[in-house]
């Protein structure tokens, strides 16, 4: 993962309405193994985060100047340090306007992954830990807590520059439970949501369930195809890559690689050819499970509505085509 430029600034602010104090670095960080390790860990933590949103820049304006600064840096009109200084000063200003915001170390990293250029921006915090020093004493030690990553964004520079119609070249972490504390960070980037990842993922799963039903597949095949879909989507999410319907279709049915793709197009589900997978939606799709008083039930979601029906009014579950192993046991018990 070649790192083109990287710098860290510090904004000192407490969530009590006090002024934000900027401690800006004057030069880029020199390339080192430590920086490469940090960025790799940051990407891993970021990719694993649930509840991310995808979108695009607002049109450049006084309220949303970030995209203009980024463009001037990429066009060679200013260097990376100057760009990051402009950006972090804007972030400092927005932090002061948001009483609940907390400061931290602000990382800007322009790096390349494969043939794609990215800009990562993250607000990092430290955690208190312990270490054993050379004298074999246990001493306090601070470390970057990348697991607690709440404010971060990643811009696919290549997509932004080369595909003017794209609506998903920016990803960012959304605030939990509708909290507005992170809105200032989204405004800092100047990002608007362009793709509904959870909605697209739900539509995909609905289309897949319809496809399985229309194909009248044996249960074993349906289970394997479900596993393939979930595995592919989870893998793409882990890598920070979108689901590609054409690619997924080929994995679901290698003998008829266009079958699922044509099913989606013919039924007009209105899905984008590519979209980010929502991990929370995927995890809910895999199985329904429940245990109570000696009873354990587990089934795949695509069976609901066909072999399994739930009546909410009577709180009953109707199961058809019971497994042979289960029916044999029941018959022996009855006999």
Image (tube, grey):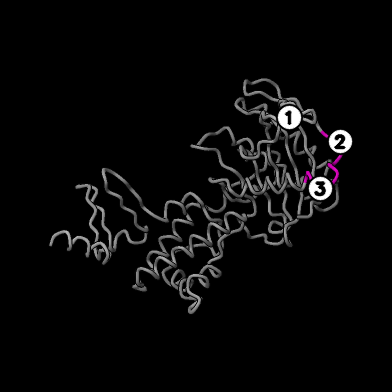
Q: Earlier in the sequence, mark 1 or mark 2?
A: 1
Instruction: Indicate whether residue 303 is drawn in magenta.
Output: no
Q: Looking at the picture, does residue 272 appear above or below residue 214?
A: above
State the image quarter where residue 273 is shown: bottom right
Residue with the mark numbered 2: 26
Residue 9 coordinates in the image, percent (x, y): 77, 34
Residue with the mark numbered 3: 5
Q: Nearer the viewer, residue 295 or 107?
A: 295
Residue sitting at x 43%, y 64% = 226
* CA–CA distance in space, label 3 to label 1: 20 Å
Give the SS element for disc 3: strand
Q: Looking at the picture, does residue 120 appear above or below residue 319?
A: above
The range drawn in magenta is 25-35
Residue sitting at x 33%, y 61% = 303
Q: Earlier in the sequence, mark 3 or mark 1?
A: 3
Residue with the mark numbered 1: 11
């Amino acid at each position: 993962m070649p790192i083109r430029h990287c710098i860290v600034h510090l904004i000192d602010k407490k969530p009590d309405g006090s002024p934000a104090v900027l401690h800006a670095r004057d030069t880029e960080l020199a390339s080192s193994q430590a920086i490469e390790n940090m960025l790799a860990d940051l990407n891993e933590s970021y990719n694993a985060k649930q509840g991310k949103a995808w979108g695009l820049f607002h049109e450049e304006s006084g309220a949303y100047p970030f995209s203009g600064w980024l463009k001037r840096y990429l066009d060679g009109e200013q260097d990376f340090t100057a760009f990051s200084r402009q950006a972090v000063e804007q972030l400092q200003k927005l932090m002061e306007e948001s009483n609940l915001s907390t400061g931290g170390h602000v990382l800007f990293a322009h790096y390349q992954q494969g043939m794609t250029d990215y800009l990562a921006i993250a607000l990092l915090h430290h955690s208190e830990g312990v270490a054993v020093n050379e004298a074999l004493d246990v001493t306090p030690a601070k470390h970057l807590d990348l697991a607690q990553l709440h404010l971060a964004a990643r811009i696919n520079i290549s997509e932004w520059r080369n595909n003017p119609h794209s609506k998903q070249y920016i990803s960012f972490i959304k605030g939990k439970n509708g909290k507005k504390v992170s809105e200032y960070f989204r405004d800092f980037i100047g990002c608007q949501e362009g793709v509904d990842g959870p909605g697209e993922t739900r539509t995909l799963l609905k289309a897949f369930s319809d496809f399985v039903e229309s194909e009248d597949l044996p249960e074993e095949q349906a289970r394997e195809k479900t596993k393939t879909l979930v595995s592919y989507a989870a893998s793409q999410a882990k890598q920070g890559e979108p689901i590609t319907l054409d690619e997924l279709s080929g994995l679901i049915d290698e003998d008829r690689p266009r079958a699922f793709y044509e099913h989606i197009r013919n039924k007009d589900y209105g899905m984008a050819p590519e979209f980010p997978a929502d991990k929370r939606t995927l995890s809910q799709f895999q199985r329904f499970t429940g245990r109570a008083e000696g009873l354990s039930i587990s089934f795949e979601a695509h069976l609901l509505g066909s072999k399994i029906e739930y009546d909410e009014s009577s709180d009953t579950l109707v199961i058809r085509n019971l497994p042979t192993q289960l029916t044999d046991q029941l018959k022996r018990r009855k006999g």
